[in-house]
């Protein structure tokens, strides 16, 4: 716990508890504290309002720990308030991680734009806090093992990456004999129906009734599926037992596959997964087919798999028997791909047609299939794949523009290398930068509540900024952010290089526009919708046919400004931009260029480069500006009705929301207010000055950040423009490293599922097994064999992987374990 400081007062002097509730479960060793409290006497806090809130949170954590009555090791915290944009949520983790300081960091992140917009003080409204105290993960598992568990709602069952909810249930136990023992046949039939299912709601409902139905019709339907397959198999010479003690993968699944191959040639291939979600199938048909009949074996019962991708939580290739995340990277190395025509999937690689042989004159490849040659020429594969020909042995690196035989272009590492070679992160060579426009902008908004600002709400409806017939929210805390001031600074890459961007006008710059004012401001004093006017200028006013790109940057825009302009772009301009985001955090709102409609515009958030408040940038970046630091503005006075109202002195101190300030800034505010309180004030003038000041500070910071990265470059040719090529400080740093310091073949790219797709195996064991096969002439199945390690089911039902396996020596199969007891620590 942190050291609390309440000065000469007790803690009760600083808060009033409006409601409180304690919940406790001795069975699960969990305690829950829910409290609603109101902060009071903030001015008496010796260390300021922020430290007071931190101490109060510390107090409630200690109170929750005591009320739990157990030695708690973890906790979660949720704080809600009507003035917060969203709740502050701290996940369930160790007490050492969930400290009051961590909560305050989250509070600053959530409250960033709220303070900026001048939302009411957090202390002006009741605060809801909920703290859950509980045991560690290991202790909770132990409680479950002891039977301390409840019924509750059926949770999603996940077993080592396998989602059981993705399986097709096979309900055969309640069917009449012999159908009640044929879950394997029913699973195959249901999966065949599933892959041929029409993409309609009616067909899907009919299938679900067949699978899950317990009525007579559904049971008859499932019985007929089993009976049909049992009747058809003898007609194709398949001797499938009607009654067997157990229907195994090794013995019975191949019989069904043979039947499907005979009845539906090239149509279906069976694969069986199990072993608690391991990535490779237990069994798989030898020949590729149009449809995959994927089954899942669990506890000697078979299920159908609806979607292999969903089963493993990523893309899955049944041919390579591995999950992957990048489609294009996997296509490049998939074994179901034809190296000649680059076709992939069913029917590939292309089969050899006897009697056909044709040579491509451009790449010297010889084709044994006419369709393969046709696809090869139509797709232009010659450009990415070349083969050495004995007739053209002079095809060397010296006389053929660097050609090297048997290499190909790798989409993963974006370089040419042989297929068996590993991929590496490639050094980045900066491209020649083109001229671009840079717009630095900032919004100021009025907060309008339909309950408290009825006149302003009606004005928004009259201006068609709010729907007339929509239901009016009755919640007093509901507020709409209406942009009533926009300031934007215009510059371009050439002006930044020449340091002309500080001038009031653009001069002779053709990119910015000849003799244009750099700073522009739109306010509600002159326009009913300043945001719309700003976007109209940005899209059309600067020339919608312009060829250069435009980057529009605001500070903390990903959480605020960009959300506001996004709605206007969609509703008024009919533009649906491409959005890069994480949750509600926007990294980029991109308008792609469309001829005669709009130019290329990328909206970005400068906070992702600096991670500092706007007022902290001048000091952090040592900016040489004349702004004198970020000033104070009465956000509570910011309403359109006050725009032309002139005061003889500054608005009341409360309009500046001093309670939302930190201790140091609060002190500066008090000094500033006492010094300037008798100055005349007009919102129309002051909001322009305040908004333009924010824009200038941000513009100076962006130019300084760009130049810092330029200075860090090891040579001028390796300079990288962070404002254009990166959207976060992390990506900027990794690009800088790859451009200036990374060497070729220095940093490897780990393949999907690691370098080894199967279980671990010692090098000495593989050497021994290869030597044994060479010495005896016997075929030893091991990890490097095409079929992989041999799997056998042991007496307890688990699957054992053998280091080596030799089939049928004197009628007896042999299993080989290489120093297994030594490697696994067994007793001798």
Image (cartoon, grey):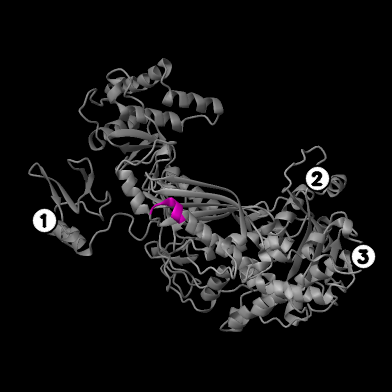
Percent across and percent down for residue 127 are 62, 53
Percent x, y for residue 786? Answer: 28, 51
User: Magenta span has 68?
Assistant: yes
Q: Is 104 rendered above or below residue 697?
A: above
- Seen at 82% across and 79% down, the residue is 503
- Residue 776 has which mark? 1
- Label 2 and label 1: CA atoms lie apart by 85 Å
User: Quick one: which residue is furthest to the top in this view?
Assistant: 216
Question: Could you say which disc has been placed on residue 466 in the image?
Answer: 2
Task: Specify the segment rendered in magenta.
Answer: 65-70
Q: Is residue 401 magenta?
A: no
From the image, state whether disc 1 or disc 3 is nearer to you: 3
Q: Nearer the viewer, residue 613 or 402?
A: 613
Residue designated by label 3 = 646
Q: From the viewer's perspective, is the residue at label 2 or at label 1 nearer?
A: 2
Q: Secondary structure at mark 2?
A: loop
- Image side of residue 251 versus residue 469, left or right: left
């Amino acid at each position: 716990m942190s050291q609390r400081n309440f000065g000469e007062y007790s803690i009760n002097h600083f808060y009033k508890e409006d409601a409180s509730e304690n919940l406790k479960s001795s069975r699960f060793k969990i305690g829950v504290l829910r409290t609603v409290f109101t902060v009071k006497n903030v001015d008496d806090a010796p260390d300021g309002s922020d430290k007071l809130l931190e101490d109060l949170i510390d107090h409630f954590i200690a109170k929750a720990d005591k009320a739990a009555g157990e030695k708690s090791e973890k906790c979660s915290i949720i704080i809600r308030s009507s003035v917060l944009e969203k709740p502050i949520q701290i996940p369930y983790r160790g007490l050492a991680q969930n400290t009051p300081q961590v909560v305050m960091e989250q509070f600053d992140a959530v409250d960033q734009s709220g303070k900026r917009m001048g939302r009411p003080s957090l202390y002006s409204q009741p605060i809801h806090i909920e703290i859950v105290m509980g045991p560690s993960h290991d202790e909770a598992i132990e409680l479950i093992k002891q039977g301390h568990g409840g019924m509750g709602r059926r949770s999603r069952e996940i077993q080592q990456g396998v989602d059981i909810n993705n399986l097709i249930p096979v309900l055969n136990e309640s069917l009449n004999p012999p159908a009640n023992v044929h879950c394997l046949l029913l699973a195959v039939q249901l999966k065949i129906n599933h892959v041929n299912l029409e993409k309609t709601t009616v067909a899907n409902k009919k299938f679900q009734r067949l699978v899950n139905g317990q009525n007579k019709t559904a049971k008859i339907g499932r019985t007929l599926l089993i009976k049909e397959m049992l009747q058809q198999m003898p007609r194709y010479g398949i001797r499938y037992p009607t009654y067997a003690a157990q229907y195994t993968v090794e013995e019975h699944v191949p019989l069904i596959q043979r039947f499907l191959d005979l009845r539906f040639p090239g149509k279906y291939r069976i694969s069986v997964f199990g072993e608690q979600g391991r990535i490779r199938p237990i069994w798989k048909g030898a020949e590729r087919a149009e449809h995959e009949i994927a089954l899942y074996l669990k506890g000697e019962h078979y299920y159908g798999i609806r979607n292999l991708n969903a089963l493993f939580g990523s893309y899955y290739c049944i041919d390579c028997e591995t999950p992957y995340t990048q489609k294009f990277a996997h296509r490049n190395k998939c074994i179901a791909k034809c190296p000649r025509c680059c076709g992939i999937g069913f029917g590939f690689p292309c089969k050899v047609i006897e009697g056909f042989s044709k040579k491509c004159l451009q790449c010297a490849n010889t084709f044994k299939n006419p369709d393969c040659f046709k696809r090869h020429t139509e797709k232009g594969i010659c450009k990415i794949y070349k083969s050495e020909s004995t007739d053209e042995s002079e095809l060397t690196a010296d006389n053929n523009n660097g050609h090297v035989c048997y290499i190909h272009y790798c989409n993963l590492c974006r370089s040419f290398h042989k297929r068996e070679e590993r991929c590496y992160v490639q050094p980045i060579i900066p491209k020649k930068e083109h001229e671009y426009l840079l717009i630095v902008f900032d919004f100021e908004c009025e907060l309008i509540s339909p309950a408290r600002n009825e006149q302003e709400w009606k004005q928004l409806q009259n201006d068609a900024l709010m729907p007339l017939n929509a239901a009016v929210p009755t919640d007093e805390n509901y507020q709409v952010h209406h942009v009533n001031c926009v300031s934007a600074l215009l510059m371009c890459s050439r002006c930044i290089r020449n340091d002309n961007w500080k001038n009031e006008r653009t001069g002779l710059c053709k990119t910015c526009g000849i003799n244009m004012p750099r700073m522009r401001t739109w306010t509600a004093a002159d326009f009913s919708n300043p945001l719309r006017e700003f976007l109209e200028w940005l899209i059309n006013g600067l020339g919608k046919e312009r060829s250069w790109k435009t980057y529009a940057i605001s500070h903390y825009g990903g959480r605020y400004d960009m959300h506001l302009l996004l709605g206007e772009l969609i509703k008024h301009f009919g533009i649906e931009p491409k959005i890069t985001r994480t949750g509600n955090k926007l990294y980029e709102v991109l308008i792609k260029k469309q001829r005669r409609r709009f130019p290329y515009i990328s909206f970005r958030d400068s906070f992702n480069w600096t991670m500092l408040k706007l007022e902290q940038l001048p000091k952090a970046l040592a900016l040489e500006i004349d702004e004198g630091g970020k000033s104070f503005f009465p956000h509570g006075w910011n309403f359109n009705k006050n725009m032309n109202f002139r005061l003889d002195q500054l608005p009341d101190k409360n309009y500046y929301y001093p309670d939302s300030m930190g201790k140091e800034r609060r002190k500066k505010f008090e000094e500033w207010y006492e010094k300037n309180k008798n100055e005349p004030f007009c919102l129309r003038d002051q909001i322009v000055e305040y908004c333009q000041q924010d824009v200038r500070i941000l513009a100076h910071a962006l130019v300084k950040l760009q130049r810092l990265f330029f200075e860090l470059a090891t040579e001028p040719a390796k300079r990288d423009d962070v404002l254009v090529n990166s959207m976060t400080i992390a990506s900027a740093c990794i690009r800088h490293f790859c451009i200036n310091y990374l060497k070729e073949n220095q940093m490897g790219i780990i393949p999907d599922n690691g370098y080894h797709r199967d279980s671990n195996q010692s090098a000495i064991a593989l050497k021994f097994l290869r030597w044994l096969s060479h010495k005896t002439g016997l075929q030893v199945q091991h990890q490097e064999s095409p079929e992989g390690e041999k799997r056998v089911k042991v007496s307890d039902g688990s699957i054992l992987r053998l280091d080596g396996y030799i089939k049928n020596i004197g009628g007896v199969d042999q299993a080989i374990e290489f120093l297994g007891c030594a490697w696994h620590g067994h007793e001798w």
